[in-house]
Image (cartoon, grey):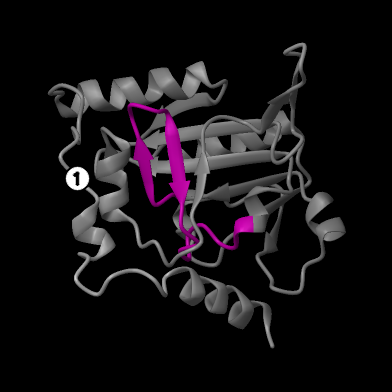
Amino acid sequence: MSARERILGRVRRALADVPREEPPYEEAVPRDYLHEHGRRGVEETVGLLAENLADYRAIVHRADERELPELLRRLLDEQGSAQVLVPPGLPSEWLPAAGPRRVEDLAGSTPHELDRVGSVVTGCAVAVAETGTIVLDGSPDQGRRRITLVPDHHICVVRVPEQVVSSVPQALARLDPARPLTWISGPSATSDIELDRVEGVHGPRTLEVVLLG
């Protein structure tokens, strides 16, 4: 018996005593909470996203399509990355013609191989202004989840305004729950009981977000 079969078996046993007349979960759980806290225009929403990203110690940049390749070249140079990991669906025009050696997102890459890569550049699925969160869903411009968890430097490009929403409920409405979702609020960080903060334990020490307008 596989792990999947064992888990589904336990779920079925747990639901065995649920009355047939009980409404399904989607109807039983009220959804009358606020989907947005206040009314904001596009510029206010993007500004709030930038503010909250910075509050979580992400480094925020703004650029247009023409400026993006030069900005990415500069950020990669400043990081001193000899290699940059690139998802298969990342727009080729985003990256500079010259720069670090590009590494493909391959299923067979080992953690040790990924650890030797200095930086990774991805797109995103959606960005949440109220929480300063970017969400990846494994789409072609984002690649496998692990490529943003092992390298020490992550550059994430957010298309503005189409990928920016105000709140988590609005983000959930856009996302497919069956996809591998990664929710990122700032660089990886943890604190011990004395609140000593350590960055880079479970992911990149440096997160740079480019708001592409």
Which percent across, then down, holds residue 128? Answer: 35, 35
Residue that lies at the very extreme toward the top in this rendered image: 194
The residue that mark 1 highlights is: 31
Quick one: SS at disc 1? loop
Q: Is residue 103 above or below residue 203?
A: below
Closer to us: 123 or 1: 1
Residue that lies at the very extreme toward the right in this rendered image: 112
Q: Is residue 135 above or below residue 177?
A: above
Residue range in magenta is 124-145
Which percent across, then down, holds residue 94? Answer: 47, 50
Residue in the picture at 72% in, 32% down:
79
Figure quadrant of residue 28: bottom left
Figure quadrant of residue 19: bottom left
Q: What residue type is labelled 1?
A: Arg
Looking at the rendered image, the quarter that the N terminus falls into is: bottom right
Is 143 part of what is drawn in magenta? yes
Q: Would residue 188 be found to the left or right of residue 93 on screen? A: right
Which percent across, then down, holds residue 62? Answer: 40, 28
Q: Is residue 64 above or below residue 49?
A: below
Closer to us: 6 or 165: 6
Is 130 part of what is drawn in magenta? yes
Q: Can residue 213 be seen in this view?
A: no
Q: Would residue 64 be found to the left or right of residue 117 on screen? A: left
Mark 1 closeness class: few <14, some 14–19, many ≥20 residues within 10 Å: few
Figure quadrant of residue 24: bottom left
